[in-house]
Image (cartoon, coloured by chain):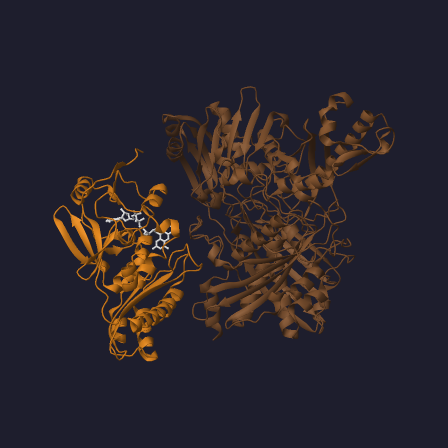
Chain colours: A brown, B orange
Amino acid sequence: MNAPQDKASFKPAYDVVGTRPVRPDGVEKVTGKAIYGTDHVAAGMLHGAILRSPHPHARIRSIDTRKAEALPGVKAVVTGADFPSLASLEVSLGEGSGNIAAISRNCMAHEKVLYDGHAVAAVAATSAVIAEEAAALIEVEYEVLPHVLTIDEALAPGAPVLHEDMFTKGLPEKPAEPSNAALCFTVGRGEPDAAIAAAHTVVSGRYSALAVHQGYIEPHACVASYNADGQVQVWASSQGAFMIRTLCASILGISQADIRVTPLEIGGGFGGKTKVYLEPVAIVLSRKSGRPVRLAMSRADVFRASGPAPGVVADITVGADADGTITGVVMEFKMLSGANPGNDTHSGAMSALAHYNVANCRVTGWDVLCNTAATAAYRAPGAPQTIFPVECCIDEIAQKLGLDPIDIRLKNAARPGDVGIMGMPAGEIGYAECLEAAKAHPHYSAPLGPNQGRGIAGGTWGNYGGPSTATVNLGEDGSVLVTTGSPDIGGSRAAMAMMAAETLEIAYEQVRVTIADTSSIGFSMLTGGSRTTFATGKAVILACEEIIATLRARAAVMWSIDVSQTEWRGGAVHCLSGDKAGTSLTMGQIAAKAGFSGGPIAAEVALNAQGFLPGFGVHICDTEVDPETGHVSVTRYTVVQDVGTAIHPDYVEGQMQGGAAQGIGWALNEGYVYDKAGRMDNPGFLDYRMPVCSDLPMIDTVMVEKPNPAHPFGVKGVGEVPIVPPLGAVANAVSRAIGLRVHDLPLTPDRVYAAMQGKS
Amino acid sequence: MPSPQFHSPETVEQASALLAANPQARVLAGGTDLIVQLRSRRIAPTAIVDIKRIAGMSGIRAADGGFAIGAATPCTALKDDKALAAAWPGVVEAANLIGSVQVRNRATMAGNLCNASPAADSVPALVAAGATVLIAGPSGQREVPAAEVTSGPGKNTLAHGEFVVEIRLPARPQGGGDAYLRSIPRTEMDIAVVGAGAALVLDASGTCTSARISIGAVAPTVLLVEAAGAALVGSKLDDAALERMAEAVRVAAKPIADKRGTVEYRIAMAGVLAKRVVEIARQRAEKA
Ligand SMILES: Cc1cc2nc3c(=O)[nH]c(=O)nc-3n(C[C@H](O)[C@H](O)[C@H](O)COP(=O)(O)OP(=O)(O)OC[C@H]3O[C@@H](n4cnc5c(N)ncnc54)[C@H](O)[C@@H]3O)c2cc1C
């Protein structure tokens, strides 16, 4: 890990914020005691199995479950008929809103199966082996329908339509016929066509990237227990226990107060655990069997049936002046969202040019459905796919005009006060500082060897705030218990403890953090969009400030003085007047006597955090391409990012490195592959090629800390931005190494080799 | 779905008798293919015969001036045998490209061979090296060239009740050198898109007196490309000879297109890798 650079220029001195203490959940995890999705056991628990469709598109004619039910040990079999037949109802969940009927049918098919792996029935039995055997005994009669896998197939005239009631939204008029285009969304300003026509230099191209999976190590898993009185408990690994509660309640028509969801430790999510897949099914199995039921996915299930990020095809034209000023951009992109309308089109369109100040632009996004798993959020959803073509075009303009690739980006960079594409002036954003830091980094001027090329790309993500609740309670000994409802996927418990300790002016070790179940704390939006350290952190800080106010009031009672005559300093209340002047009371001393001064000391803050700011990154990537095989090696990689204030720098750097690694995978070797029958052909880590350790160099990190004025310590959000630039950075590095551009990701050896053969 | 019976015999004869008694029985060595296939339900044997408890089945011993490698010897143990690693570095390296350290602590070359994947990494190296395989069965033992053990993807030529007890490598010839390389999109944990092995013998003047070139993942079985070897014999491995050798390899390669590579790419890479392994083998031969 690097030492943080250039910290002093922006940030006040803190005692705890910015240090690197051991994470509070670390020991439990490394000793194997932490309870993840499949570790939770309930008394009398049954094991579930799901039967999944082998067809990408088919009507379900009939389902015969008799043989499965007759198998000894089987306690319940359910199908779509056991779920309420819901009308369409939109629910908003932030990263992952959707239509309740569609979400329900994605958990368990009703009339049709829409992709290979779509759940059609489920079993609960006394052992996992029996459950799987029973699932195989269920007889489903399918009427196989023609399927579509690509954008061209999905939009072709006469293409089979997934949802007969789906008409493209966002067009001036409602279309006459249903189609696979769910949405058309355009943002823009100025006169982009005229600007491009008048431009000194114009570049254009069609770019594409495949659907990629979030690739979290822990497959989805949950246990549900339905009681005869209608009260339900769910234990699940996810990014949002409240998200599970909202969706299960809506899908199954249960009061939210009757569903208590306990978050378990989570082995990675990256946006992919912002949806329900198993939980409603486990509840229905438990209701039918009367016993708790565990459902868990295999890795193949995860690939086939849980959300990848959408693939994209984008046509782009960029015009620039002779000095590199970008004068006009027109881009039309199509996201391949899988079986249900996706969530990446708006964010993709709004992110595409958000890091540049472009006077004339038009970005049109289409949300296109096809017979593959319904997509889900993945780190900065939508932004990597739309920023990749932009960053490639800027690189080409720089090459045509003989400009330095960082200088051209600096010339066009969005800066504080610039009015963005949505008409809002930018706040304290740090893209220009990132570009300057990248230019100054020794990596940028290091010499390159033969067959090597260096690529630069920038990127951004809007980050998020939103609703969060936190409580802070004092033990009688003055120790501090922080409780939130935000699942910890990236070290947020450590960050919460640090922000509480900093606010209270006490040691980090004096604070412990718990993530509560949905019946034990007020609502928090799910952990996603890089919102938790910002929004939930703000709730923790404000609750700590309330605690300070309470402690001062209690001390004033104990000293019989007015509260104005007390001062909070160094984790204690100091007496400023009266006969106790000059003395102080520690938190422990006040807490021990709390019974005499007004009762337990606690605070709760529920807020809707506003004032979040986007993050920006600049990546420097060196690649070496084997001229005989087309094999691309990443030889050096540096991530520069405006992270706001880094609360725990290790976890900030870890996010930067992890996001970059995932983005490099997207650029080089990852991607969903289907066979002719429409079945996923690589549903495992052998042929779905995420980078392994030896594929990557040490990823160097530079944190640019430009604080967010809307957060007490300046937090912006970190986790999404780093997956955005790698697609462009790797593609630009390869194009400079081989002297030609490959527009389609991933840059697999055979594709790069074929491109090089075409050139020679 | 009853679980399979599990046997761990202690002699070759017991193992062979157990295999002969049940046509559905499967040999278990490292299990790194077998367990994966069981779990994914590609196979459903009714009995499993673990050969690791059989005396002498694990380990490497000197035999006839060369080496006899017990069928249950894990790949990592090959590296630890200094004499073997010095004599046949290509074979040892090929076996140690398989999977990860954890996989190689279990996986065996005999399992790699009997599993009969066209992309098996150790097999082209064994074939180039001229390895033979000792097979035991109800009617005694027989020795066959490694290239004859497989007959197609997932198919081997072992008769009912037979199993491999030993892989044999000759002594390294004077002026000999071998090598194996594979092409994969990543750097490890991948299946060969193409593999190529070479074993050469050079005389004191640097003239090639013997050359065996093998290729993997480009045909239903690993191929020994005799025309490729012939193109090198008598030459000093000059560019023209290497190109003739590579062309013979490309002609012999009859790959399929699948998710791991196109036909064109596999054919081209077979030629590229063949040249590269010959170069490494030449350097080793010159040092010998
Ligand atoms: C994560 C992972 C990565 C892998 N990577 C690679 C790779 O890079 N390259 C590669 O080539 N392979 C790879 N493999 C496949 C596998 O590890 C190798 O094929 C290995 O050499 C198999 O050896 P084993 O001892 O584990 O065989 P087992 O699984 O025990 O057996 C394999 C098959 O051969 C039969 N068999 C085993 N021994 C004998 C015998 N003595 N006589 C007769 N039949 C026998 C078994 O019945 C079975 O059908 C990988 C596997 C995994 C799980």
User: Which residue is more in the foreground, B81 or A358?
Assistant: B81
> Count the marks: how many?
0
Q: Nearer the viewer, residue B209 or B159?
A: B209
Quadrant occupied by the N terminus of chain A: bottom right
**Could you say where residue A727 lies in the image, as x and y percent from the top left?**
57, 59
Apparent side of residue A312 relative to residue B106 in the rendered image (left or right): right
Is any part of residue A719 visible from this angle? no
Dividing the picture into quadrants, the one containing residue B211 is bottom left
Q: Residue at image x 18%, y 54%?
A: B134
Q: Residue reaching furthest left?
A: B139
Give the quadrant of residue A474.
Answer: top right
* Picture coordinates of residue A591, whole percent (x, y): 72, 27
Whether residue A412 is visible: yes
Q: Does A722 sit above or below residue A296? A: below
Answer with left or right where residue A583 lies relative to residue A46. Answer: right
Above or below residue B81? Residue A318 is below
Give residue A268's position: percent from left, percent from top.
54, 44
In the displayed image of the protein, which residue is found farthest to the top? A229
**Residue A545 appears in which quarter of the rendering?**
top right
Q: Residue at x 62, y 66 (%)?
A: A442
* Horizontal side, residue A242 vs residue B30: left or right: right
